[in-house]
Image (spheres, rainbow, N blue to C red):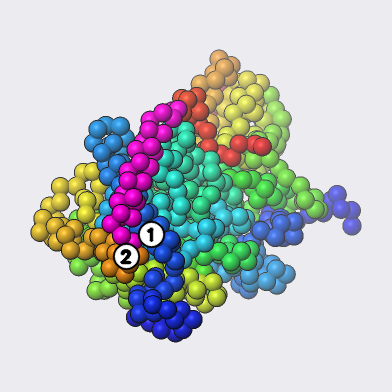
Amino acid sequence: MAGASKAAVVDSRANLPFVYRQYSPEQLREVLHKMYLIRRFEEGAEECYTRGLIHGTMHLSIGQEASAMGICMPLAEDDQITSTHRGHGHCIAKGAEVSRMFAEFFGKTTGYCKGRGGSMHIADVAKGNLGANGIVAGGIPIAVGAALSSKMMKTGKVVVSFFGDGANNEGAFHEALNMAAVWKLPVIFVCENNGYGMSTSTARSTAVKNIAERAAAYSMPGVIVNGNIFSEVAEASFKAVERARAGEGPTLIESKTYRHRGHSKSDRNRYRTKEEIEDWMANRDPITLFETELRDFGFIDDQGIQAIRDAVAKEIADGIEFAKASPAPEIATLQNYVYTEPA
Amino acid sequence: MDAALRELSYAQAIQEAMAIAMDMDERVFLMGEDIGVYGGAFQVTGDLVERYGAERVIDTPISELGGAGVAVGAAVTGMRPIFEFQFSDFATLGMEQIVNQAAKMRFMLGGEVSVPVVMRFPAGSGTGAAAQHSQSLEAWLGHVPGLKVIQPATPHDAKGMLLAAVADPDPVMIFEHKLLYKMKGHVPEGHYTVPIGKAEIRREGRDLTIVATSIMVQKALDAAAVLEGEGIDIEVVDLRTIRPIDRQTVIDSVKKTSRLLCVYEAVKTLGIGAEVSALVAESEAFDYLDAPIVRLGGAETPIPYNPDLEKATVPQVPDIIAAARDLVKGVR
Ligand SMILES: Cc1ncc(C[n+]2csc(CCOP(=O)(O)OP(=O)(O)O)c2C)c(N)n1
Ligand SMILES: [Mg+2]
C-alpha cells in the first residue's frame, strides 16, 4: 500500500494499513460502533417489517457497511452525499440518528422526512445527506449539480454520489460523469458493486469487467477497492477527497462488495447460490474483518467490543421505542410540502 | 424616446429578465445547450455570455437528463439555475429529473429543501421543424404536483413571469412559443414581476369567454376583433399559468358570458381544454351556461412537415372565428 510518504507518522503504527496511521484509536473504535449500528439498524428494520410495523418495502445494506463507512470517513460534516434505494447505511455513516430514521420508516412526523419519504427517500439534509432515491441513477446528476454549487459558491464542499452496479448502465451515469470531468467538479462517484442489480449480475449486464474502467472514458481516475475492507475504502476515499478539494476534479471509486440479504423484501434469491451467500457471510463479512484487525493491532479488546455491541443494542431498542411513541401526521396535512409555503 | 412606449421582442424581454435576475442575485446562472457564444438556438440568451462570462452562462454537453439533474442539484444546494432546453420536445429526455426529482424532492424530504430551479422550453409548431421539434407538451408537466407551469403570451408577461419564476422557491417550467419570440410589445424597464397563478382578462366582453393559452391568446384577440364587426362581444382570458390554474377568473368570466370556448395548440384530447371545461362544469358557473362548452385544440396527429398540413394541425384565426360565431349563434 502507498502511504510510506506520510513520514510524519513514525511510530509503532508505521507499517499498519492506512486508517491506522491516519485516524486515532477512538475514531477507529467509533467506526466499528457505526458499522454495528448500521448492521443492527438493518436487522431492526427488517424485524419491524416482518412484524408488520413498517409497510412498503426496503433494501438492506447488510454486508456493505465498510463501504458506507469508509467512503464517509474523510468527509467533513458539511460535505454532501446523494444516496440510493439501498441507503440506510449511507445515512447513518453521514451522521444520522437511528431514532429519526426508524420514525421515518414508521411514517411518523418525527422522521427525517416527516413520514413522507420512508425508507427509499431517507435523507438528513442537516448532515449533508441530500437523500436516497427511488430512481436508479437519479442521484448522480444531482450530486454533480451540488458540486457545481460548491464550485460556484466557493464553499469547498465535496459531494459523494453513491450508486450501485446497476446504475452504471443508465444514461444519467454517463452524462453526469462527463459533465463533472469537463467542469472539474469536486464530486466523487462511488459505485458500490455488489455483483447484482436485482437479479442481473454485472457479467450479464455490463460490457466492462470492472466498472472503474469506465472512468477512462471520462478522463478521471478509476479506482477499484475491496469494499469489505474498511481501510482500503477509506484510503481511496481520502485520496479522492483530497483531489476534489484541490480542484483537480472527480474520481470514480468502484467498491466491490456483496449484499447478504435479498434485493428487497420480494426476493427469492433464485439467481445466486446459497453457497455463494454463505461464503461471503462466513469469510468476507466487513464487520468481522475490521473487528479482527482492530483486535489484532491492539486497538480494542474483547471487553471493548462487547461494550460497543451493548451500546448499539440499546440505541436500536431506544430508537424503535421513539418511533413507536411518535405522533403520526394528521390527514389534514396531506398536501403539505408539495410547494414551499409562503413565509 | 418615451420609456413608457419602449417595445421589445418576446425573446429580448426574456433576455432582459435573465440579465436583471443575474444582476440582482449572484446565485442566478444560466445553463443549456449552445446558450453561450452561439446565443441559444433561438437567440434568447444572445450575447449574455459576453456580459456575464462563461461561468454564469454555461454551455452544457448535449445531455438533457444530466443537465436537468445538475440544475436540480445546484438549486437544492443554494444556487438559482435557469436551464434552457433547446426545444421543449427534449423534455422527454429530461423527464426523470423534472418529474421524479425536481417536483417531488421537497415533498419526499418533508419540507427540508426547496428546489428553486427555472426551466425554459421553446415550444410549439409553425417553424417547419416537423414532428420532433414542434410539440406542445406543457400539459404533461402541468399534471405533476410540485411543479409550476407557465405560458406567457406577451413580451411584457414573458419578462415579468420569468422574474417571478426566478424569485419562486419551487420549480417553475416556462413554455415559450417559438413564434412568439419575434412578437413585439411594450416592456417596462427594470425589475417587475407578473404573478404566477393569475390569469389575465385581455379583452372584456359579454357574449362568450375564450380561454386561451400562449400563442392562441393573440389569435383569439384577432378573432374577437373580427367578430366585433358582427356585433359579437368576446371576452378573452389569457390563462398564463396552467399549474396552479386560476379557477376563479375563469369561473367569473363564464358566469358573466354564459359561454365557453377553450383554445390551445396542444393536442386536443386530454389537454388543458379538458381541464378548463371540467373546472367550469364542476363549478357554480355550470348553471350559467347557455351552450355546450367547446374546445379547439391541436389535431390528433404529430406535427407534419408540409406547411399547409402544419397550419391545419393547430387552431388558426378563421377556426376560432367560426367556432365562436357558431357558439354564440347557437348553431351547436
Ligand atoms: C430507473 C429505474 N429502473 C429500475 C428500477 C427498479 N430497481 C430498483 S433497484 C434495482 C436494482 C439496482 O441495482 P444496483 O444499482 O446494482 O443497486 P443495488 O440494488 O444492487 O444496491 C432496480 C432494477 C428503478 N427503481 N429505477
Ligand atoms: Mg448492485
Q: In the displayed structure, would residue A130 be above or below residue A243?
A: above
Q: Residue at position x 70%, y 60% from top?
A: B26
Q: In the displayed structure, would residue B159 be above or below residue A343?
A: below
Do marks 2 and 1 share a subunit? yes
Provide the residue designation for mark 2.
A294
Could you say where residue A167 lies in the image, as x and y percent from the top left? 33, 60
Q: Earlier in the sequence, mark 2 or mark 1?
A: 1
Provide the residue designation for mark 1.
A29
Q: Residue at position x 43%, y 36% from top?
A: A115
Q: Is residue A327 visible?
A: yes
Specify the segment rendered in magenta: A300-328
Subunit that carries the residue with mark 1: A
Q: Would the CB of label 1 be found within 8 Å of ligand 1?
A: no
Residues packed near mark 2 inside 10 Å, few (<14), some (14 to 19) or many (20 plus):
some
The quadrant in which residue A235 appears is: bottom left
For the residues bearing labels 2 and 1, Cβ distance under 8 angstroms: yes
Q: Amino acid at mark 2?
A: Leu
Q: Main secondary structure of the magenta part?
A: helix
